Amino acid sequence: MIIRIEKPSDSEAITEVTKAAFEDHSFSQQTEHFIIRDLRTAGALTISLVAEVDGRIIGHLAFSPVTISDGTTNWHALGPVSVLPDYQGRRIGTAMINHGLALLKSMEGEGCVIVGLPTYFRRFGFKNHPLLLHEEVPQEVFSAKSFVRRMPFGKVEFHQAFKQLSLIEKDAITDVIIDYAIAGIKLDLANPAVESLISKKILTQMPDGKFVMRPSALAEYDSYFAKVSQFVVAEMSRVHKNPLLAAVSH
């Protein structure tokens, strides 16, 4: 097995490995390959490693920069980590992580954070630190490893690429865009996708119980949907204000 830095020609294979690796994981929103794509597009892949067997890419690992509220710099997030199902259980992920951490340290990285099972990542020196937080995940699955003596404290923010909408959330937004009305629309609060979009402040409930969409909040997760929703909101507002247009029935 060879572990090496990704090449431009590897992107399609990395996408397929990542999709296959997370396909049957109940905790996954199936957005990991989009995260890697957006990190690459933004030039935010600090390290992107592939594991190769007989010329075939069977694993991938990414590191990307994070920001910490205390001003600490040169810290990174580890993940996603992907290994094809047929090759899992052979310590390929372990080898990639060890290789990546050593490479990150040699590049003068000062530390790394990870969201994942603490029982697994403890073997690499990751520990839970109560004063270092990532508000979007439970504290017990958020761990850190410092390459220097000082451990930072405060809130950790991952790169924007990690803010991805799941497929069911995108379906819900599509329905909202299609049915959108200037006065808001009624939604099923029992729908977990709707509940998630409310928690992300993409949907806001009005006093009458109807919901309106916030394109600015949506833009943090999906710029394309945000542009579409902004267009729909603008058009609905234009029709609403023009009595002649408002009188037209379709």
Image: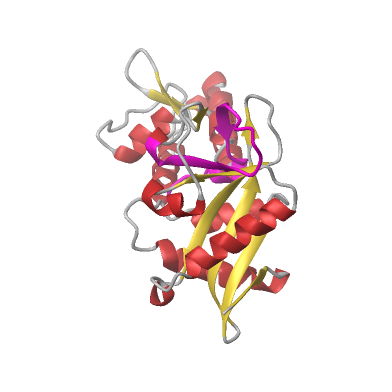
Query: Where does residue 16 sit, x and y in percent of width and height?
Result: 51, 70
Left or right: 29, with 126 as reference point:
left
Asked which quadrant contains residue 73, the reply is top right
Query: Where does residue 207 sit, x and y in percent of width and height?
Result: 36, 12
Asked which quadrant contains residue 111, the reply is top right
Q: Which residues are magenta?
A: 140-166
Does 136 sit above or below residue 242?
Answer: below
Left or right: 87, with 132 as reference point:
left
Does 83 sit above or below residue 133?
Answer: below
Residue lying at 39% horizontally and 77% vertically, measured from the top left: 86
* Residue 136 seen: yes
Q: Is residue 74 magenta?
A: no
Residue lying at 39% horizontally and 25% vertically, measured from the top left: 211
Report the front residue among 197 and 87: 87
Report the front residue among 126 and 243: 126
Query: Where does residue 94 sit, x and y in percent of width and height?
Result: 49, 64
Question: In the rendered view of the protein, which quadrant contains the N terminus?
Answer: bottom right
Report the front residue among 186 and 235: 186
Question: In the rendered view of the protein, which quadrant contains the C terminus?
Answer: top left
Left or right: 77, with 9 as reference point:
left
The residue positioned farthest toward the bottom in the image shown: 54
Q: How many marks?
A: 0
* Residue 233 seen: no
Q: Is residue 144 magenta?
A: yes
Residue lying at 75% horizontally and 52% vertically, measured from the top left: 107
Query: Where does residue 157 sit, x and y in percent of width and height?
Result: 58, 34
The residue positioned farthest toward the front in the image shown: 149
Residue lying at 41% horizontally and 61% vertically, measured from the top left: 22
Left or right: 31, with 73 as reference point:
left
